[in-house]
Amino acid sequence: MKPYRELTKEELVQLKTELEAKYKEAQAKDLHLDMSRGKPSADQLDLSMPMLDVLNSESDLKDSTGLDCRNYGVLDGLKDAKALLAGMTGVSPENVIVYGNASLNIMYDTVARAMLHGIMGHTPWCRLDKVKFLCPVPGYDRHFAITESFGIEMINIPMTVTGPDMDMVEELVQKDPAVKGIWCVPKYSNPQGITYSEETVRRFAALKPAAEDFRIFWDNAYCVHHLYDDKQDEIPEILSECVKAGNPDMVFEFCSTSKISFPGSGISCIATSENNLKDIKKQMTIQTIGHDKINQLRHVRFFKDIDGIKAHMQKHAAILRPKFEAVLDILERELGGLEIGSWVRPNGGYFISFDALEGCAKAIVAKCKEAGVVMTGAGATYPYHNDPKDSNIRIAPSFPTPEDLAAAAELFVLCVKLVSVEKLLE
Ligand code: PLP
């Protein structure tokens, strides 16, 4: 198909008339569809229902060490739960603290602790004039919301197909002691589904930060969320890479069983060095006597080990794969060759990221909404909700039924075409 840029003005005007007619027809269908929610569908959640049967009033609620999970005890989590979560990220169980129902509040807590108390004896960030975080973009809005809520200045770092622009990361981290952290989703990133290359991971581990309390916030939220059996992205394990590079304390890694078992009712962890663990536990012991061990036990008994998780994730993939492919096929069929948008075909994760012509994202999302299809707000994937190019749109294919998804994707490509033609006619 001919790129839209190569069309004459008359051809564009003609195309606009045709597209407007199609858009009117679509509006008349009175659609009520949603491609904004990055959450599992009900049939994915059904996969974990048997987990609710593994514990009942007859069950032995002692863990494998003999600990009675019904009572207080164990600040940092059951031994077997540590092993389960360690298996997901490839770290050693000794590096893990198991937390509560989900990982986002560990990230919030970790930033809050650094603000209030400082990291390993360093000045609390709240006493500094300026604290900055690097934010690979597009990225996860809730990461940016955490740092924004603490008044931390966020600096955009462009993503490439191999991860964040590492030349820029290295330069900023090395020269500016106010740069205290970076948000990373190293595998199947939200929203692009990009996995960092081995070189990117090694460059991260070898950073030479000006600030001794600089930390990489390594959110491995999609570590086992593959879509295919034969195309699985893998990354080097960051904690051991940091040890090898002489930076053992530089990383906080996070993960959870959200989107494996039940989002918001799973188990989660932070994995980090012994020094960091000691520092965290000092404050954690004031915060809590311990997290929900019965839920930890339920997860351990249901999944057993990493192989149990992998088998379970294949079932998720069987549900998710056709949905991703339906959207990607429609994007390719309808927009391929038009040069009015680009996207990456991910091997896992929860999202497809679409980059429209500059200055078009907000208008596309608004047009979709007027015809009954809700998309994630344009700009949501950038700090301060400010996408400087107004180009990125996050597509979340997991929640709708395949039929709804196809209808929503058809409307989306129509809106992309219409807004792009309007832009080119400006
Ligand atoms: N991190 C990323 C990158 C996510 O995309 C999400 C959810 O969409 C989360 C964390 C939330 O994780 P949790 O449910 O463990 O808080």
Image (cartoon, rainbow, N blue to C red):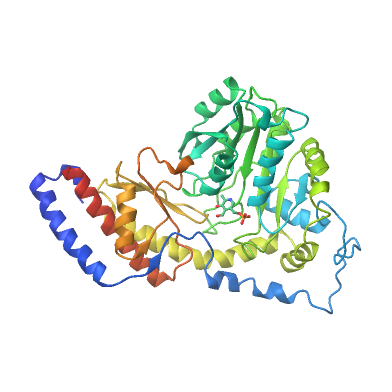
Residue in view at x 46 percent, y 48 percent:
192
Question: As drawn, is 378 to the left or to the right of 97?
Answer: left
Question: As drawn, is 334 to the left or to the right of 199?
Answer: left
User: Residue 138, relative to residue 77: is it above or below?
Assistant: above
Residue 145 occupies which quadrant of the picture? Answer: top right
Give the x, y percent position of residue 123.
Answer: 72, 27
Question: As drawn, is 38 to the left or to the right of 378?
Answer: right
Give the x, y percent position of residue 253.
Answer: 67, 44
Give the total of numbered labels: 0
Give the x, y percent position of residue 9.
Answer: 10, 45
Residue 7 occupies which quadrant of the picture? Answer: top left
Q: Is residue 419 visible?
A: yes
Residue in view at x 58 percent, y 20 percent:
175
Q: In this rendered view, identify the residue nearer to me: 272 or 381.
A: 381
Q: In this rendered view, identify the residue nearer to me: 63 or 326.
A: 63
Residue in view at x 16 percent, y 42 percent:
6
Q: Is residue 189 visible?
A: no
Q: In this rendered view, identify the residue nearer to me: 4 or 114.
A: 114
Give the x, y percent position of residue 360.
Answer: 30, 46
Furthest toward the top, the residue is 175
Furthest toward the left, the residue is 10
Furthest toward the bottom, the residue is 58
Residue in view at x 78 percent, y 29 percent:
121
User: Residue 78, relative to residue 382: is it above or below?
Assistant: below
Classify the position of the C terminus by image quarter.
top left
